[in-house]
Structures are given as C-alpha cells and as structure tokens.
C-alpha cells in the first residue's frame, strides 16, 4: 500500500509518509496553520508552516472546508501533547474534493435531524467510536464462542412459523407458498444444530414488529443465540458470565480511547468484570417490594424494577427460576418446583437493563407437545421441532444476547439507535 | 466441564474420560461390540468387551438404535488404524434416550425427502463436514479483513430502496410507512461507512426474490460486501485475490478431514492458491469465440461460458473492464474507454462459476446523477447516496463475495442448498 493509516503512524517516527482522508477541522495563526486530519482509523494534527510549503499549499487554509477530501504528505513527529502521540509536519497537500458546506456542525442538532442525516452523522467522533466498539464486541463474542467449542450455524431469516406469538412478526409474501415471516430468534433452529455439532450459535439480524418507542427498542436488531447439547441450567449461566466478562475485558483492552471519547465511566465498567450475582425471581420480587415496589408474585420485571435491582450492584445480576406464566413454552420446568422454569435473565448494572435471556430447554417430547397444544401452536408446523425430542433427545440449554443493548451498556450510550449503523424504528426506515 | 469432546481425546491418552453424544452406528461380533459414537466435534469407535462391563451394558448392543443419545465412560487408547487415531475402551454406558427408528438411513434418499428432513439430515457426516467448512470460511474472511484494516459495519436488511432493480425484491409492509424491501446488498450503505471508518464490510443474509431454480440460486443467502476509500480498480482486485487465497489456505489447514469426507480433490484446491489470471471482457469473448461460443460483444457470461473460460485454469480468473451496458449504474467508467466500466468478476475454476463481483465506484456527483436519472431512479430516495459525492468524495472500490458459492467451490459441493443450514428456494420455506 502506498499510504499509511493514522492508527499506524507510530511505526513511522521521523519518516516521510502519505495519509489519505478528510479535513476534520483547521486552526490558523499567522505563519502556521493546523489541519486536523481524519482517515477513519484515527485523528492526527498536521502542521503547515508558511516557510516550508509552496504558497498554494499554505493558502489552502482559506479554501479547505470541513470534510474536504485530502491526501497529505509530511514527516511524522512524536508529540506527547498530541492526543494520538504523533503529528505530521506537512510537505504537500493534494486536494481530492473541496466539500460543500457540511450540514453537521459543532452546534447542537436535534435527534430527528441527525437520524435523517445518519449517512453523514456516522462520521462524527462519537459515532465513529461507537462503531469501533461494535466491531470489538461482535468479535469478542465470536472469539469466546469459537474458543469454547461452539460452531457458527446461521439460522434462516425467512421462516414459516413464529417463535413467540405472531402479532409482532413482519410478514413477507413468498411466491406461491403464501406468507413467510422474518425471524425473531434463531433458537429453535439452533436446537437442530446442536444435534449435528454439539454447540452452535448464530449472530445476525432479527426482527420485531413492535410498536415500542423506548430507547431500548429497534424493529431490526442483531442477536447472538447460542445453544449447547448436554449443558444444563447452572452451566448455561456460567457460560454467559464468562462470555460477558471476556467481552468487558476485550473492549477495555482494545477501545480505551473510544470509551474516553464517549465519556464512559471506565472504572465502573472494569468493576463489572467480577463474579456476577444470582438471585431467584422470588428473591428479586422480595427485594423490590422491600424497596417499595408493588410488583406481583408472577410479574415480569419492568425497566424501573431492573434499574432498582441493580442499583447497588457493580456487576450484572442473573434473575433465575421464573414463574412459568412469565416465560415461553420451550423452557424446562424446575425439578424442585414445577411452577417455575429453569430460565435466567441477565440484568446489566447502571440502569441498562436486560442484556441476555436464556434457559434450559424442555427435552421431553410429551411434555413439550402438551405445552404447545395448550398454547394453540400448530403441531404440524412444528413437527420438525418435536422430532428433536424423538431421535436422541438430550438435556440442552441456550441464551440470546442483544448486541445493541450490550454495546449500549459497554459504551455508556443510552439510546440503542446510536449503536447500529442504520437504526430502524416504527417511524424510521430511511436512509 | 465434566466431559470431553471427541476432537480433544488426543489429550487424554490412557486416561478415563466421559463423552456425551449419539449413536452413529454399531457392529457386534460375539464377545465384543463396537459403538460408533459421535458428539458433533468428531466420531470415535468405542469398544465394549463382554468381560469388562456389566451385563446390562453389554446387552445394549441389542437395544441401542441409531441416533440414541448416550453418555459413555471409558479409557482412551491410541489406535493408529482408527480414523481419528483414538478409541475408547468402554467401562460404562448411560442411555439418555433410545431413539425412535431414524428416518435417514444408509440407503439413497431423494433430495426432496432430505430437504424436508433438513433438521435431521444436518446430522449426517457430509452435512456436518460442510457446516464445519462454512464456519471456517466465514471466519477466514472476517480474519483477513480484520487484519487488513477493515471494520465490520452491519448494513440494514429493511431498506426503502432497491440496489439493482425492483422485480426481484421481497416486500414487507412496514407500519404506517408503506413498504420496506429486504436488502439485496449492503453496498450503498457501506459507501457511507468508508467515510467514517476508511474500510468497512458487512457479512449477513441478503435476499433475492428470483424465480431461478438452478443449483446456484437461493432466495436467502449470505453475502460479504467490502468497501474501501482511496482504493482503485487494480488494488481492489489485489485485495480480492489475497483474500481468496487466504481462505483456501485456511480451509486446507483446518478442514483436511472434512474435505476428505466430502471427497474433495484437495490437490486441485491447493493449486488454486497461486497468482490469479486477469483478462478483459473483450479477451474473454475472443477466447470463448475461438472455442466455438456465439457470445456477443456486449453479452454477460453465462454458466457455460464461465465453465469454458476456466476449463484449462487451475486458478480463479478475473474478467475485468466490462461493457457499461452489462453492469450497474454505480460502476466507474474506464478512463481509457468510456464504453467500459472498471468492474471485475472473479470466476472460480472447476465449473463453480462467479464467486465475486466488484468494481471501482463512480465518485463524481454529476456523472452519477446523470446515470441515475437515465435509469429512472428516484433521486429523492437516493439523495443520501448522492450526498457522499458532495462532502469529501474520494475514489473508492468494493466487492461482494457470495458465501454459499464460495463454500460450494471450496468443499466441492455442486448444489448451494447444502452449504447453508436451512436453504430457502422458490419452492421451499420449511422447515
């Protein structure tokens, strides 16, 4: 390659290099001006001295606009006061394009304006930082799973059946076969995968046609679903805990600078890399009531409950053994109390709420069939799922991680719409 | 973990271990019988000796059926004649479930039967091998890109506009906003990403509502789209070539056993890891005519053409500089000949056909606008895409790899429907 990325300039101290990117900002002061240059991998100050460059290069201080594309050649110089530790003393600037007046400036913009200009907003330092953290979180999850005997197993998006209810499904007319539905979760398909590969996961987009307008809801979001044969409830939580702690460590190791740009409380994030708390749903209800909540014995936890539950906790909290009425048909009942299921939700601290839902799955054919009939599910459509309980059924468990919510917590970004390149909500399908 | 995966038994020579999995097969001969055991990670022969186990364990030779789930404890023994190099001398067998009579047997089944039982077919040795190669290919691509300055940038599936025509788009009713369409390619979105991150890619499902019924077509398939700022046509091909050669080496390194199970000609695959051939579209047309083809000057290459073109080649062949009529509106014209575009298709040898399509992109606002108007595209809907040519436009290029076609070639599997867990075609949406 005939040019250098800013993230690698530390390898070229004292050498002449070329960088290719955009004008992030500029500052002038008499016989010297500074081009704040960005190329996506980093930001670097380039110093332009009147006595050391051609006149037309020096005069670019007047014509270069924000986001103009430029190719800059100069000498790398160590500069400890500089954010990246290095600066460039400019020899030459080649202008690729002088940008039109850029719509996004330093002033405050409304969220609707920014979302309508998402294709440009992505260039800002904070959005760039979130995208880099997203990259890290995605591969930290993959690497942990790959190193722990899981195989990737891409479940289908176009499905004939609903995993949980049908009112929140997007429909797609499908040739002469009637309707298909966009998948809400690959879980049921992953259960076929474990019978071939032992441990599997998928990691892709899923869809919920929910009319929710909270800061935690998108209609299209990314989910990692994992499933493992012969893994039971307690070990299922162990895997989740190890995975999340690994992700925390990886993000802190790789994205310290991005976390700083986002103003994340890094010490607080570090504290979450310690043994997670585990409590039963009943214990959580008792605790919440002691704090004044009016939550019922068989209620799900609301956002306010989740926040209250983790208020005094530095680490995520597992809430396990839920009343069967609160959870899906496929969860295995607790052997000690058939009114409970062997499911657990993992609640992130600092008010970020649920980031994982998981459970041991019902592996008995007749019990599963009975539950599906009770929920008026089409036995015919789900025969393949029941088959898994006829041909070598095994105890097994799994869990699903919501990528955007996890990134929200890791990066300290309150609204999940900033954690995905092009967010889709009930009101927004563009750009 | 309280048990061992078959892939790791080589670490336990002479030790007593427990494995958890399924009965793949069994063979009896007097006072000894063999349980062919599989757990997803591998297959291992377990020897059961009448004199060394309890009577009820020995008698399992009569009751264990194919695919029954079992937990086996025994001593690991090195056995060079064994396919995996190790066997287990059984001490104990715990039956989890005796499987019902398994529908898939050693006899030949029709493809419709196998596809309708895809949830079970996945367990067969060949399908298991293909899934493992898919895992390797996926991460080989990601690792190459991550090591070469690309950031993951997940483009949206629900989109307001069409990338290439609209007749092959799946429609989705979207709340009060009218219709959304399932993405056919993330390319245009990736072009926004390079302005933030320099080099980006996505890697997820894309959708084409094509009525094609060939062995190379699925309605839902996985695509990796990459895009890079300041990369021009020739360098774009260099990146593709390095990427594909890296994938070949990685698959051969990690999946030799799986390639053997599939009967892949491994020597032939190895030969493809050498400098790729490059020819212009015109050269390819001249060559094909010399072989008797009636292909026209401005024709796309059909499957037969692609096969003929690579017949005598051990390595993939780039066909570059196509007549502008054959390619999409966003490709940059060749500076030397405005009737051609700076696009290239990469054709795999051995008849597997196109595995990559790529090009340098048009970066001039006015030229791009003119082309879009000529194609009757809605300028209003694509304003965000045109914006990229107003605010710091740069030369840039990208390409898309079809995952299933690449796996097909790597693994030597002719029909792409076997290269994805649950294939979707015009006639099939289940299971």
Image (tube, coloured by chain):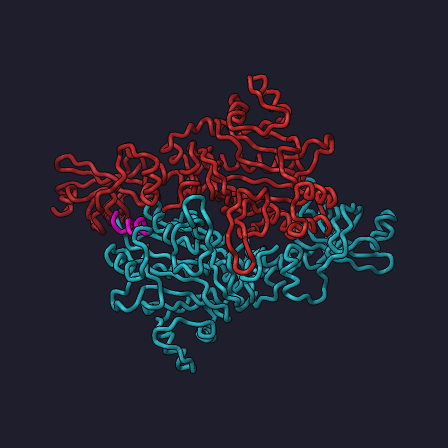
Chain colours: A cyan, B red
- Compared to residue A79, the image places residue B83 above or below, namely above
The answer to whether one can see residue A57 in this image is yes
Residue nearer the viewer, B43 or B113: B113
Residue nearer the viewer, B214 or B64: B214
Q: Quadrant of the N terminus of chain B?
A: bottom left
Image spot of residue A247 (x, y percent): 49, 58
- Whether the magenta-drawn stretch holds residue A131 is answered as no
Please tell me in which quadrant of the rendered image residue B300 appears: top right
The tally of labels here is 0
* Range shown magenta: A382-391
Is A229 on the left or on the right of B344, as rendered? left
Image spot of residue B194 (x, y percent): 64, 49
Residue nearer the viewer, A285 or A207: A207
Image spot of residue A318 (x, y percent): 40, 67
Is B96 on the left or on the right of A119, as rendered? left
Is A16 on the left or on the right of B189, as rendered? right
Instruction: Tell me which residue sits at (24%, 48%) in the image.
Output: B70
The answer to whether one can see residue B9 in this image is no
- Compared to residue A204, the image places residue A425 above or below, namely below
Instruction: Tell me which residue sits at (55%, 17%) in the image.
Output: B292
Please tell me in which quadrant of the rendered image residue A262 appears: bottom right
- Compared to residue A138, the image places residue A3 above or below, namely above
- Whether the magenta-drawn stretch holds residue A384 is answered as yes
Image spot of residue B214 (x, y percent): 45, 33
Is B429 on the left or on the right of A61, as rendered? left
């Amino acid at each position: 390659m005939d040019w250098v990325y800013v993230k690698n300039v530390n390898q070229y101290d004292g050498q002449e290099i070329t960088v290719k990117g955009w004008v992030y900002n500029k500052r002038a002061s008499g016989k010297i001006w500074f081009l704040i240059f960005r190329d996506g991998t980093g930001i670097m100050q380039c110093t332009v001295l009147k006595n050391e460059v051609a006149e037309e290069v020096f005069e670019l201080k007047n014509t270069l606009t924000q986001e103009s594309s430029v190719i800059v050649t100069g000498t790398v110089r160590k500069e400890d006061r500089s954010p990246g530790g290095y600066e460039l003393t400019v020899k030459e600037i080649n202008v690729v394009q002088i940008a039109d007046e850029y719509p996004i400036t330093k002033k405050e913009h409304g969220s609707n304006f920014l979302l309508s200009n998402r294709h440009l907003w992505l260039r800002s330092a904070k959005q760039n930082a979130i995208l880099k953290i997203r990259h890290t979180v995605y591969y930290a999850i993959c690497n942990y799973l790959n190193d722990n005997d899981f195989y990737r197993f891409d479940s289908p998006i176009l499905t004939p059946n609903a995993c949980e209810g049908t009112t929140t499904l997007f429909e797609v007319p499908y040739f002469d076969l009637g309707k298909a539905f966009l998948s809400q979760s690959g879980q049921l398909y992953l259960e076929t995968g474990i019978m071939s590969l032992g441990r599997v996961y998928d990691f892709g987009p899923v869809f919920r046609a929910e009319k929710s307008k909270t800061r935690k809801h998108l209609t299209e979001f990314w989910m990692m679903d994992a499933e493992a044969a012969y893994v039971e409830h307690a070990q299922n939580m162990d895997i989740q805990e190890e995975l999340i702690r690994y992700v925390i460590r990886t993000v802190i190791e790789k994205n310290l600078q991005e976390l700083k740009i986002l103003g994340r409380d890094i010490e607080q994030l570090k504290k979450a890399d310690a043994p997670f708390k585990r409590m039963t749903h009943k214990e959580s209800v008792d605790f919440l009531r002691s704090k004044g909540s009016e939550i019922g014995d068989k209620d799900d936890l609301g956002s306010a409950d989740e926040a209250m539950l983790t208020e005094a906790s530095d680490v995520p909290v597992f809430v396990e053994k839920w009343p069967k009425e609160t959870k899906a048909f496929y969860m295995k009942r607790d052997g000690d109390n058939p009114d409970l299921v062997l499911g657990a939700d993992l609640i992130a601290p600092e008010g970020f709420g649920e980031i994982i839902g998981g459970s041991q799955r019902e592996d008995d054919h007749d019990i599963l069939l009975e539950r599906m009939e009770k929920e008026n599910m089409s036995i015919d459509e789900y025969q393949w799922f029941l088959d898994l309980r006829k041909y070598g059924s095994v105890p097994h468990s799994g869990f699903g991680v919501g990528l955007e919510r996890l990134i929200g917590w890791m990066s300290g970004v309150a609204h999940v719409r900033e954690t995905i390149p092009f967010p889709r909500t009930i009101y927004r399908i563009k750009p």
